[in-house]
Each structure stands twice: as C-alpha cells, then as structure tokens.
Image (cartoon, rainbow, N blue to C red):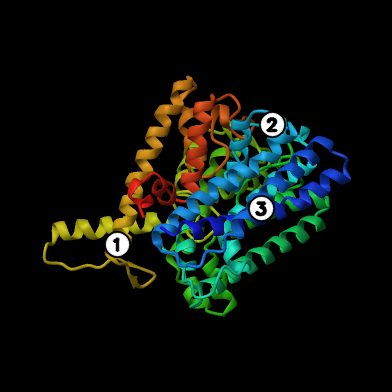
Amino acid sequence: MNRRMIIYLIGHILTIVALFMLPALGISLYLQERGAAIGLALSIGLALALGIAAIMTRPKDRSLHAREGFVTVGLAWIVVSLFGGLPFFLSGAIPDFIDSLFEAVSGFTTTGSSILTNVEAMPKGLLYWRSFTHWLGGMGVLVFMLALVPTGRGSGHSIYLLRAESPGPQVDKLVPRMRRTAEILYTIYVVMTVVQIILMLLGGVTLFDSVTITFGTAGTGGFAIRNDSLAGYSPYIQNLVTVFMALFGVNFSIYYLLLIRSFRTAYKNEELRAYLGIMIAFTALITVDILPLYKHVNEAIRHAAFQVSSIMTTTGYATTDFNLWPQFSRFLLVVLMILGASAGSTGGGFKIIRVLILLKSARNSLTRMLHPNTVRLTRLNGTVLDEDTIKGTHVYLTLYGSIALLSMILVSLDGYSMETNITAVLACFNNIGPGLDLVGPVGNFSGYSHMSKIVLTIDMLLGRLEIVPMLTLLTPSVWRR
C-alpha cells in the first residue's frame, strides 16, 4: 500500500476544494453575509493548510495500483464531504454537524436530497457553494484532478483512479492516455455547462439563478435555490432544463464520437437507444395518465417530460408535486429511480447498460438451458463482453439489492410509512433527490433521526462510487503492507 502517494493525492483534492470555495466567499463578502463569510473563510483556511501539508510530503514512489486506486477514491470522497460540509456548520446556517454532512454528501454525490425546510433563507454564498458541489461531483473530483493537476508522469495510476470513480461496469478510454481522456471529458462538460447558462440568461433568468440551476442540471444533482424547485420558472426554462438533464444523462463518450464525426457508431450504441426509448415511452405513458389533472395537453406533456427526465437522469428537480399524480405514474417514476441514466454520464442509478447486460445474459442462459449444445456469446454494441464484466454486473446487482434492503430495514426504525422509507433509500442510493410521500418534491429529509441520516449518507456515497471503493475501505487485507 503506497500510503504516502494516497495522502499526496488527497492533498491535491483538498487544495482544489478550498480554491473552489473562493467564489462562494466572494459572493458572501459582496452581499455582506457575515456568518457565511466566516464559515467559508475558516473552511478554506483549514482545507488549504492540510492540503498543502499533504502535498509537501512529495512521495518518491508515485506508483499506484488497483487497490490504492479504490482506497484513494473512497477516502478522497469522505474527506471532500467532511470539508465541503464545514461552511454550513461553521457559519451556523446548518447548526447540526450530521445535517451539514448530509447536505454536503448529497451535493457532491449529485443526489439533491436535503434537510433544509426553507432553502430561500440560506445565504446566497452558501447556496452557490451548495449548487457548485453538484457540478464538481458530477464528472468526478478525481477526474478533474487528473485533467488539470500534474501528479507525476509515468506513474500509471490514472487508469485506476478513473476506473474507481467513473460510473458504469466499464470505463471508456477515449484516447490512449488516460489523462487526455479526463481532459476531453471535462472540456465537453464545461462547454455544455456554458451553453446552458447562456440559454438560461436568454430566457430572462438572473445570472445567479442561471449558474446555480445549471450546476444542478450539469451534475444531475437537483439542489434548487427556491422552495418550489423549478415550478416558479417559465415554461421555456422548464423545457430547456428538461432537454439538458437528458443530455447530461447520456454517456459522454457519445459526444466524443460526434466530435470526431463517428455518427454511425454513436447511432448504433445500444445503451443510448435504450435510454432515449425508455425516456420517450415513459413520458408518453405518464402524459396519458395525468392528462385529466391539467387543462391543456401541452402542460401535461411538459410536466411529464420534465419529471421523467429529472428522475431518470437522477437530477431531482421538480415542476409540480408528483406525489399527487395517479398511482400508475408514481410507480413508473419509482421504476425510473432504479433504472437511472447511462454509464459514463453524470447521472446515477443502476445504469441502463447494466440492465442490458443482465437481459442479454439471462436470454443466453435460457437458450443454453433449452439447447445445451448451443454456443451464444453476450454482445453489446457488436462487441463480445468478457465473463468478468458479466460476472461483475451480477455481483453488483447482488450488492445493490442487499445494501438497499438493509438500509430500508434500518431507516424503517424511525416509524415512517413504507412508501416514505423505500423511496427515501432509493432516492439516496440512486442519487436522485426526492422520493415519495414525506420525502417527495415538496418534502425533505429533516424528520429522520441521526442514525437514519447517517445510513442515507452512506447510501449516497455507495451509490455515487458504485459500492466497491467504499467497501474496499472496510476490507482489512487492503490495509496490510
């Protein structure tokens, strides 16, 4: 275990987080938000001091293998969450540390679940920081570090960090060098973010609202700066966010294929076609189901499309209280909570690609049972999947179901309804944000006990990092020299 290298990398992460708090501090100073400014300043100072101290260790051996990669990613996300929650706690805006940690983890993991009962009462500097955590966590904190920070040439550790932090059963290598891959991903991410901000401004929204809403859309996070989420914005803004949520839920390798004009390969991508097909089909079904609730067909389509895009991409914004929708529509939304977005996107959930792998694997197993002499390979996008990928998907399904079930049992001790508890776990584990009933779009998670909030906080980290990096930290053999 190369512990000095792990500390060195986490030092870089802490420094990055501290520097990214500066704009929030500037906003608080400009608006004379004294408590928020003090909380942000103290957090920046502490993170910079520890980060620089860790960087100064400068390990001679900068090699990093798979084990260290998982440990680095797991520890980095815990450290980032702890320091990311300090401004809320030290400013007094969220006086309870567990609540501050819950809010920060929800931000970085792009979950969007909140304990705040009155979002609009928060200082704007902290609202900016709260939304920015979505943007930074969406593509990945360590992916950002790999893209911009030189951590040593020839160390060969980039692949392990990218694999541990990137969502999905496989990591798409866009170019031979992993650092260049990270640069391409973040360039696409930044360009799409800027485009949405410009289009939001053209819709008459203030710069602050445009930036914070875009951060939540890009990271598919869903922290709103208004108590009614996006219900109070114009249909133009709601439709714009609907489109961009769907775009950020697409595997970013598709955009790279479009940039290099490999249109045919992009079109034939099975995950993309399934993702768009499910989104369109569920929008149509929900529109028909909720049509009696709205005066015009266009209004029903707008709300249905927004909520489907928001839940499937695990963003969590809302334009209406879908708790009041018919049972059929709410059930479809729960299905979308589990399915999630595409691998290699900023969205969470189980991922469409895993569903495809499981379905193809099940079909081949059934064929072999009926025709023992038949040899059928599992293919995805015309490529034969290796047994490790298929086996890993089945293992992930087992862990996913086991952790979700255990979490539901623990959270149910608080005595809330089954609908509340089940969807609360699904919302946190799949990094969605709102659930149903008490944790619906007009509710929050403030009523849960500290124990339940800790369980849900762990679920958010497990869901964002897709279980393995966090479980690695609990494996004793990993820490042996």
* Residue density around tag 1, few if under 14, some if 14–19, many if 20 or more, within 10 Å: few
Residue beneath disc 1: 388
For badge 1, the amino acid type reads Asp
Residue depth check, mark 3 versus mark 1: number of the one nearer the observer: 3
Measured in 3D between alpha carbons, the distance from the residue under mark 2 to the one under mark 1, in whole angstroms, is 45 Å
- Relative to 439, residue 234 above or below: below
What's the residue at 63%, 63% (across, down)? Answer: 189
Q: Which mark is residue 11?
A: none
- Relative to 87, residue 132 above or below: below
- Relative to 195, residue 309 above or below: above
Instruction: State the image coordinates of residue 9 (x, y, percent, origin top left).
Output: 55, 59
For the residue labelled by badge 3, is the local secondary structure a helix, a strand or a loop? Answer: helix
For badge 2, the amino acid type reads Ile
Residue beneath disc 3: 17
Q: Nearer the viewer, residue 403 or 228?
A: 403
For the residue labelled by badge 1, is the local secondary structure a helix, a strand or a loop? Answer: helix
Instruction: State the image coordinates of residue 262 (x, y, percent, origin top left).
Output: 52, 79
